[in-house]
Amino acid sequence: MLKLRLQKVMLLISFFTILFVLYQLSYSESTHVNSKDSLLIKNNRKPVDNDYGEISPNEIIAELRKTSINMPLPGQSVTSRSLPPLFGGQKIVHLDLKGAPVKVAYYKEFFPLIRNLGATGVLMEYEDMFPYSNSEISAANAYSRTDIKSILKMAKMNNLEVIPLVQTFGHLEFVLKLKEFENLREVPKYPQVICPSRNNTMPLLRSMIDDIVAMHPASRYLHIGCDEVYNLGECNQCLDIILKKNWTKKQLFFNHITTIASYIKEKHPNVKPLMWDDEFRRMSLQELIASSVGSLVEPVVWKYTPTVDTYLPAEIWDKYATVFGSVWIASAFKGATGPDKFVTDISYHLENHRAWMKLVATYADRLTFKGIMITGWQRYDHFAVLCELLPVGLPSLAVSLAFMSQHDVETQRVPSLATEKLKCGPGLLHPKMGAHCNFPGSGIYEKANQLVSLLDQIDQMMDMSEVKGWLTDYNIQTRFSNPAHVEGATSDLDRYKMELVYLEQDMRAAMGEVFGPDTIQEWVYTYITPVNKRLQTLWDAKERLLAQRVWPRRPVSLEL
């Protein structure tokens, strides 16, 4: 009987909900409302008598309140009101400035944009772009102290936390490449890793740390790098220490990073060191505990692939939960699909963030995820060519940030927030097409995508049967080919050459708004000049073959 009455109540609630919605619609569209009936309901003057028994309007309203606590406000979806975002920690955008810094004025547009997209801070990896007190370390086009102050001021205006990064173990190529510091290399012929055992190592690193911290007095964290320490315990000094102290190479590693972290704790007590975690993954729980590293640093666990959990299994998270308690994670929005990729595959990086959000949900009950560092590598190391430039990766960053603010980890839609903030049209996820956008630096993004399209057309031309059969090295060398097929194969060649000329002009102009002339020249020489050489070589071959009017009898001799 009680069950039947509850069913009647729920049906009546549904009936009056529909009635109320219709009433609101009719009220907004017309003033001819039955004021007597509406007043009757509003003042609860008369109970409703129906087949479900006598229930007063007060009872109906009480039931509606019980069932509508999580009902959305007008114009708001149920999901956006009742569910938390996929990631509630800090969202730190990594700026890799190695050898190609953006102009200081660009931050004035960039910082408000990423803040509106959901970023809470920036990780500044200056590398050789910082004005160190030892000026030999800094690049000739490094930021000045005034530049740094301006950047920090703009970050503060946009409520963005700034976390500086200074390498202190691996990836010190920008220092160890110099003659002055050649003797500090772990392996003499490789300038990647600094020797932790030489007398001059710690004074150099302490000086660099002090320079960075002094310029960032408001920063609560300092990232000390320490990833990819490929060469460890190989020089004579390190081998001697390992032998004398009966250490393993792991203990040599721990000694170096705890020395660095302890110095920061003592000299800069308000600054917490962060470091990449990859060297910790192969350490045992006992080794990590014995090193006391858990009280000195917070690890940043990085993985940039569409699959994360297979590389970072449960035992790693259990180990980190015991030693550290809280961690940071690191994804990528660009610069992780190849050292010579100049356009960003947004779908690839979206899947990386989807994988991370699933992993966070799995282990959130074991440890605290303080934040995510969304990395955007500009070079794979100091010596590598430029990969995707910052404006080229901006749509990917926007999609990733917007995705993490949503609630459904399985959503396949491009978050509307990203397309709206960047003023982008359709095609954003297409890795070879892109979309028309209007954001700071969007001209660079569009021209890079145009170059991809042009390269595809050139590849299609080179895949034609006429090219494979009549424009081979043999045909060109012997000047022995069919002119009709040569003309057919190269009918679009002149157009491609002109398109490339105009594209280079437009790209130089677009890059000039964001980067200095050295970066522009490097990018053009890396990605446009080889294409121009390729087309010119083909054009010269075409002219050579079409100039031939008579041909010899076989066998044809090769002019080597």
Image (cartoon, rainbow, N blue to C red):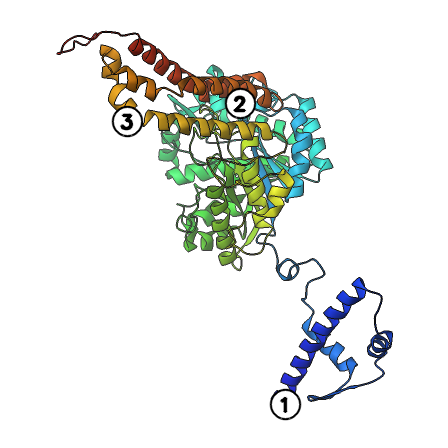
Which residue is disc 2 drawn over?
A: 99
Q: Which residue is depicted at the point 37% across and 21% down?
A: 189
- Residue 430: give x, y in percent of width and height: 48, 39
**x 71%, y 36%: residue:** 156
> Who's the residue at 42% across and 26% down the image?
455
Secondary element under disc 3, as helix, strand or loop, is helix
- Position of residue 83 relative to residue 279, above or below, is below
Q: Which residue is mark 3?
A: 465
Q: Mark 1 vs mark 2: give the one in front.
A: 1
* Residue 12 pos. (x, y %): 69, 81
Q: 147 and 220: which one is in front?
A: 147
Query: How far apart, in angstroms, are the residues tagged by discs 1 and 2?
Result: 75 Å
| Residue topped by disc 1 | 2
Give the secondary structure at mark 2: loop
Q: Secondary structure at mark 1?
A: helix
Measuring 69% from the left and 77% from the top, which residue is drawn there? Answer: 15
* Of callouts 2 and 3, the N-terminal one: 2
Please tell me which residue lies in front, 147 or 214.
Answer: 147
Which amino acid type corresponds to the residue marked 1 in the rendered image? Leu
Q: Nearer the viewer, mark 1 or mark 3?
A: 3
Between 146 and 15, the residue placed more toward the observer is 15
The span from disc 2 to disc 3 (Cα, nearest Å) is: 43 Å
